[in-house]
Amino acid sequence: MADLVIALAAIFVSAGVLLLVANHFGLSPVPFYIIAGLITGTLGFAQADIVELAQWGIAFLVFVFGIQVNFGDLQSVLRDGETAAVTQLVVVAPIAFGVGFLFGELYGFDAPVRNAIYFAAAATLSSTIVGAGLLKEEIRDNLVHGRLASSIHFFDDLVAIALVLILSVEVFTAEAVTSSIGYGVLFLAAALLIYRHGYPLLIRLAEGFEELILMGSISILIAFIAAAELVGISIVVGAFAAGIAVRSEGAEALGVRNGIESIKDFFVAIFFVTIGALVSIPTVETFVVAAVLIGLVLFVNPFVLLLAFTYEGYDSRTAFLASSNLNQVSEFALVIAIQAWLLGTITDTVFEAIILAAAVTMILTSFAREFKEVIYESVVQRLVGERQTRKIDERSYVPEGLDDHVVVLGYGRQGRRIVETLERLDQPYVVMDNDPVLWDDMRAECRHYVFGDAMSQYPWENARADSARLIISTVDHRPVSETVLDLETDADVILRCRSSREASELLDAGATYVNVPNVLASDQLVDTIEAVFDDETSKAQIKRDHLDRLVTLERYGFTTRFDRQ
């Protein structure tokens, strides 16, 4: 226990100092956590203690990911996500297994088949923790590439859990493997049962008391982890099942999300620092194996997924952004490697190569995120361009000859109200969005619509932006706003942003008007206050109007999920 406390102290002291540097320069904290781990690893802590900390850090973060899984949102892209994931599994896994087996034969590994499986798992599965962290804004904003990548993560996690259950048995026999898989199925079944019936009961009994709901959620996590220890399977499997059991949607879950977020950073630091601490000076063999593994993860995996997404009909930009968020070694691959190391079934070369590759890919992914648009425009767009437009055409309806119309970008809260106003004024319009969750609503409720990415040119051609009289963007995303301003059109442009400074810059760049929600909310509040003192409008009428608006938002689902519009 004393050694663990000292290790934790070293972790947080080194991480804290480096985070000051990251914060000062506005950089991602992930590389600095790993660098802190490299420093901590030189202090001579026992590898067993570091491995123990890594398992607990991974377990809690996997629990957080499980909580964030929204089955309703994933369902809209799950088919295409599964198709891409299966393609990745069928193409990349055999290649990686063959490479891993060749390394085993070349370097004389014990149990070359089993080590090849460990190598293939690390090459094929992508990181939920890093990927979800980098995609946090995209997932929150319901951008389709974020949801596609999230669905791949979810599929990979299910595959990884099966591998953890199979490969973590002490004696590799049919009976032991069957028993372990059976326990895993029971855990997931129990999680879904609690998700469907138990958690709603907890919310009702807590009567909206957020601390009780949070405590109940943590109790579910502890119960699943204890059960996993009891039956002899990885605690990470129990943590993932516990996350699935906890509901993340609904206003009642907001306190749980906030409470979990408040302690997540603690385990984020433990996870990434321990990964860095496990990295050792590589031998020539380890360096070669790690280099090949890094190549498979950074280039082969995303390329296969890019082809799969474009085959499914997604535009090249969406396909690239989704696939480029799936190029890190998975934490589940680390769980598999750690379990194998504890059992003595993985060679030191493969184990150290997986750890090194995980650290390198997580660092590179964090830095490369800043250059995705540049990479897409300079490389991918030139190769693929705007050729893949089938899904856009299939999910769009704009009649020939439409002109002098309004293009409404985004069919969220603001977009719907704008469309209602245009309908009342009998003004022709086209709605553009790329959120598959909203496509059915667009098709049923809008006269004309285009399903596509606003950062690509082809959807704007479909929406006939060149002949529009007005373009209204409800999307608070600077690159989208700049794309709208760069369109070759004489239409007036109304944009949205978060700050007055950005609004001034967009107005100088050519926007006709910029919607700053905080300013508008203040103006609306002032109008409401004046109406309260105005004898012409009764307080009862103000209350009825406000309740009607809240009911409308609830009907559209915007009071219970994050929405960008």
Image: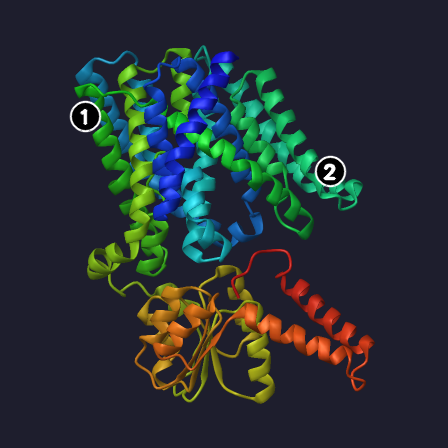
* Vertical relation: 415 (above or below) 356: below
Mark 2 crowdedness (10 Å alpha carbons): few <14, some 14-19, many ≥20: some
Q: Nearer the viewer, mark 2 or mark 1?
A: 2
* Vertical relation: 463 (above or below) 121: below
The answer to which quarter of the image holds residue 16 is top left
CA separation in Å, label 2 and label 1: 51 Å
The label shown at residue 563 is none
Amino acid carrying mark 2 in the image: Leu
Q: 509 or 214: nearer the eye?
A: 509
Amino acid carrying mark 1 in the image: Val
Q: Is residue 507 left or right of residue 182?
A: left
* Residue at image mark 1: 288
| Residue displayed at 42% across by 23% down | 10
The percent position of residue 356, horizontal first and vertical second, equals 29, 27
The percent position of residue 530, horizontal first and vertical second, equals 72, 79
The answer to which quarter of the image holds residue 127 is top left
* Helix, strand or loop status at disc 1: helix
The percent position of residue 5, horizontal first and vertical second, equals 50, 18
* Helix, strand or loop status at disc 2: helix
Q: 91 or 209: nearer the eye?
A: 209
- Sequence-wise first label, 2 or 1: 2
The label shown at residue 212 is 2
